[in-house]
Amino acid sequence: MKRYHVTTFGCQMNEHDSERMKGMLESLGYAEAPAAEEADVILFNTCSIREKADSRFIAHLHQAKGLKQRDPERIIGVGGCWAQSVKDEVFARFPFVDVAFGPGQVHKLAEFLTSDSLTAQGFFEFEGFTGHLPGKRARDFQAWVQISAGCNMACSYCIVPSTRGREVSRPLEELVEEVRALAAEGVREVTLLGQNVNSWGRSLRAPAGRSRSFAELLHAIDAIDGIDRIRYTSPHPSDMKEDVIRAHAELPSVCEHIHLPLQAGASRILKAMRRTYTRERYLDRVAMIREHVPDAAITTDIIVGFPGETEQDFAQTLEVCEQVGYDGAFTFVFSPRRGTEANAITEGLVAHEQKVERMQRLVEVVQRRATERAQRFVGRQLDVLVEGTSRTDPSRLRGRSRHNKAVNFSGVASPGEIVPVQISAATSQTLTGELSLLASASRVA
Ligand code: 5AD
Ligand code: SF4
């Protein structure tokens, strides 16, 4: 039997695409190999969001070159955003690559593997959502659901609109059917995926002729039996409407966590980033979340050192972080990306040392506020979806709260169970506790 190995870089959408690659390969009769050295088909699902993502992947690709030299029958494939951003150039730069395909072209891998000529084929069209590949999920009880493909925003720093194309929403009925089928297989938690999830539905028509809304989709999925938790990523603050925020308060399965990418705290920089909201408008969204779902965890993405960012601008980013009190944040140093608008900016570039220094200050504020925020969980009993054993202590269990906090706890429970955990300590990243002896109604085997 032929064997494959997939290495995944980048975001959750890429992880999901990799699951679909694996499902497709298994339907073609391939089995998963534990390491690239043992595989007949070696695949990389790549990311290009920052320069670091590129360089990490290139190092892996050179290892694959060595494996191909040892066994020329091996197939090397490169998919995902980096592949899309360089397209056919990949064959000139890396002649040992046999097949390359963009993020929307995962299904073309099957066409390639079953074709007669297994050399230098590239697939880079944008086709919207490319259908119903059988996914191979990492866990039986959790699933990704891709609700849209592509992105219609034009954030000036971001390579994604050029790697994933224009936005296409999948129909409501199709998504409901997919989640029903997942629930029937034992899935309890779904994460809805899109580059801009909450703009979902704008191009779709409901029977009455109006367009669909993301809140409507949340309602429809909440109504499906067996789905206990709904998450989604990533929303755009400009499309964060009150009906979506209310859904968090009103629908039992929509989790108390909202990832709301800030990117920068100064309206001037937001404008240069083409984020389509101001600092005030962003804070207004946060206030609306706090009003309807006071306990919600709010997390964010922040970019430091965008061209033109002054000390005053950066101080405003720190201020927003102090004010919001994020439960967590992903922080990035600005990285110029080929083909983006910001890549062409030549004035006001922030020096590397300055970026590093700002990053340190930012991380201090983010972590301090996250640690403070996390203390609200101490002494409370939280429902935890068990994922497995703790990474640092195999005698303990690990899971996630509805707020998306990692929880390490003592007790006996199986992966996929939702159990009550009494929280005794909290850091910025993790909560610690023990399985509550009080049986909870939420405990379902
Ligand atoms: N440089 C640094 N960070 C970036 N991101 C996107 N593009 C860039 C870039 N060119 C960050 C944004 C986005 C997250 C996924 O990655 O914060 O929300
Ligand atoms: Fe990387 Fe963005 Fe592509 Fe995801 S969508 S793989 S983060 S470039």
Image (cartoon, rainbow, N blue to C red):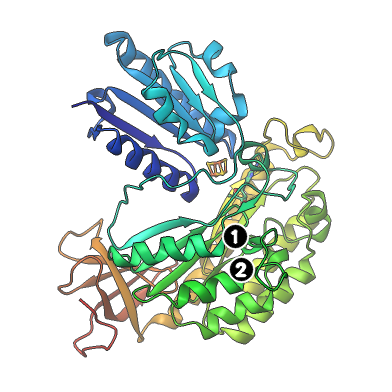
300, 185: nearer the viewer: 185
Residue 168 in the image, given as x and y percentages of width and height: 63, 51
| Cβ at disc 2 under 8 Å from ligand 1 | no
Q: Give the left or right position of residue 116, taking residue 408 as reference.
A: right
Q: Give the left or right position of residue 86, taking residue 23 as reference.
A: right
Q: Comparing marks 1 and 2, which lies closer to the viewer?
A: 2
The mark found on residue 214 in the picture is 2
Residue drawn 42% across and 60% down? 178
Q: Evaluate whether residue 429 shows in this view.
A: no
Q: Evaluate whether residue 24 shows in this view.
A: yes
CB atoms of marks 1 and 2 within 8 Å: yes
Residue identifier under label 1? 197
Residue 347 in the image, given as x and y percentages of width and height: 84, 36
Q: Amino acid at mark 1?
A: Val
Q: Give the left or right position of residue 101, taking residue 238 as reference.
A: left
Rendered position, 300 above or below 28: below
Q: Amino acid at mark 2?
A: Phe
Residue drawn 56% across and 79% down? 247
Category of crowding for the residue at label 1, using alpha-carbon neighbours closer than 10 angstroms: few (below 14), some (14–19), many (at least 20): many
Rendered position, 76 above or below 19: above
Label 2 element class = helix
Q: Quadrant of the C terminus?
A: bottom left
